[in-house]
Image (cartoon, rainbow, N blue to C red):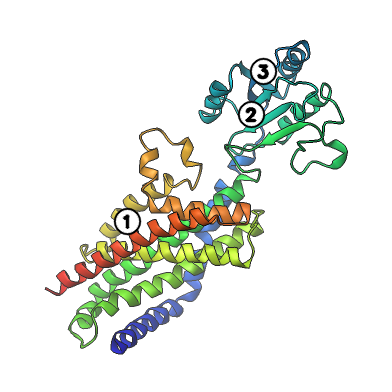
């Protein structure tokens, strides 16, 4: 066993020396990719629309509530797309046909609260629209009703309008996106670190030398996995730092950062195993690059990296639930946006990522064994 770990360490050091020999280009590459994604995609959710589509649910059906609905319809910031029941309004929200659901309670305007706001996860700038709805409601609601306070609203402007981001976070799209970018750069580090090095070693004759050398053959796989873990951690750190510098928020503590790195490591192990499995079957880098992109990009798109998985078409959503990247992205997003990682989510996320990693390790060992034969 000691020989195995000695061989693994020696091969890991070799990979790191190769990385160090071209460290400037490697670091620049690690910066440009996430920076491009952040700059081009990070501001997609910050645009302001001329008017925000809203759905209204009127449980009060009294004179004041009717006047409230009329005031909403008269606002230039708002476009009422339906006065309907709660289930239908929420469906409009899920289908992105409405961005806010305004629910008027039976006790309007004296209830505490008497108006509930549910808004969607499209991350457009709803600030002006939400403020407009709140201001209109304040004209009807009793000022002394303080039971439900609008989140982050100054005390002088508190009202009895309750905002509930049921289908979203109340943070910027940029903060939402960074979790997906961290996972993406980690996967690319794993896929193009481990697999590319196998193909390069084969083309230069080093792989044949390793296979006939008196070393543990599994140490070849494990040594490259350790290298891809380090590469993924470097990429993830750079992506997170760039995101924060560009305005993203990180609500977690140092312990939260530990969870982020743990998820990156799990993803790196699983996808480095997949990369080594593919690389042992493909003699050319060009073919390997095409295949890996065909595998990675669909998994990334359906993982919720750009938008919540609930917005996926009905036929794609089940696939997102078996995508390991979905669980890694959700875990990092929990830490970044909310500052904590629920125990239930930890168990589910690490169980799925662990099962994927173990499966890929076993398959990569078998592929190497077949290469020897």
Label 3 neighbour load within 10 Å: few <14, some 14-19, many 20+: some
N-term-proximal mark, 3 vs 1: 3
Q: Can you give x and y, in whole percent of width and height, for residue 230 in the image? A: 45, 72
Answer few, some or many: residues within 10 Å of disc 1's Cα (few below 14, many 20 plus, some between 14 and 19).
some
Cβ atoms at labels 1 and 2 below 8 Å apart: no
Residue 213's disc number = none
Q: Quadrant of the N terminus?
A: bottom left
Mark 2: few, some, or many residues within 10 Å (few <14, many ≥20)? many
Residue 285, position in %: x, y?
Answer: 28, 63
Q: Which residue is mark 1?
A: 292
Q: CA distance from mark 1 to mark 2?
A: 40 Å
Kind of element beneath mark 3? loop
Marks 3 and 1, Cα distance to the nearest angstrom?
53 Å
Q: Which residue is mark 2?
A: 100
- Splitting the image into 4 quarters, where does residue 255 fall? bottom right
Label drawn at residue 59: 3
């Amino acid at each position: 066993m000691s020989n195995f770990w000695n061989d693994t360490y020696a091969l890991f050091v070799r990979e790191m020396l190769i990385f160090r020999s071209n460290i400037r280009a490697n670091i620049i590459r690690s910066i440009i990719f996430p920076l491009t994604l952040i700059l081009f995609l990070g501001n997609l959710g910050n645009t302001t629309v001329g008017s925000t589509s809203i759905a209204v649910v009127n449980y009060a059906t009294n004179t004041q509530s009717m006047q409230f609905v009329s005031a909403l319809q008269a606002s230039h910031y708002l476009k009422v797309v339906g006065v309907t029941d709660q289930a239908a309004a929420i469906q409009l929200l899920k289908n992105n046909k409405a961005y806010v659901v305004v629910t008027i309670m039976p006790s309007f305007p004296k209830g505490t609260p008497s108006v509930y706001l549910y808004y969607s996860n499209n991350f457009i700038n709803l600030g002006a629209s939400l403020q407009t709805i709140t201001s209109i409601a304040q004209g009807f609601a009793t000022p002394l009703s303080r039971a439900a306070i609008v989140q982050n609203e100054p005390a002088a402007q508190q009202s009895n309008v309750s905002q509930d981001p049921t289908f979203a976070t109340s943070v910027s799209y940029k903060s939402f996106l960074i979790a997906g970018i961290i996972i993406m750069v980690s996967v690319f580090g794993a896929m193009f670190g481990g697999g590319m090095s196998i193909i390069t070693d084969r083309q230069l004759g080093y792989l044949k030398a390793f296979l006939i050398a008196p070393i543990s053959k599994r140490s070849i796989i494990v040594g490259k996995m350790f290298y891809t873990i380090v590469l993924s951690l470097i990429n993830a750190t750079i992506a997170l730092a760039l995101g924060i510098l560009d305005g993203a928020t990180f609500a977690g503590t140092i312990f939260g950062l530990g969870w982020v790195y743990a998820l990156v490591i799990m993803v790196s192990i699983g996808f480095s195993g997949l990369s080594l499995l593919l690389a042992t079957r493909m003699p050319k880098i060009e073919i390997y690059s095409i295949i890996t992109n065909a595998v990675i990009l669909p998994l990334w798109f359906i993982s919720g990296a750009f938008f919540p998985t609930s917005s996926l078409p009905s036929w794609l959503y089940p696939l997102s639930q078996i995508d390991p990247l979905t669980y890694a992205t959700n875990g990092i997003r929990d830490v970044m946006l909310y500052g904590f990682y629920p125990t239930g989510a930890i168990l589910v996320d690490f169980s799925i990522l662990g099962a994927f990693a173990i499966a890929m390790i076993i398959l990569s060992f078998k592929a190497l064994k077949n290469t020897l034969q």
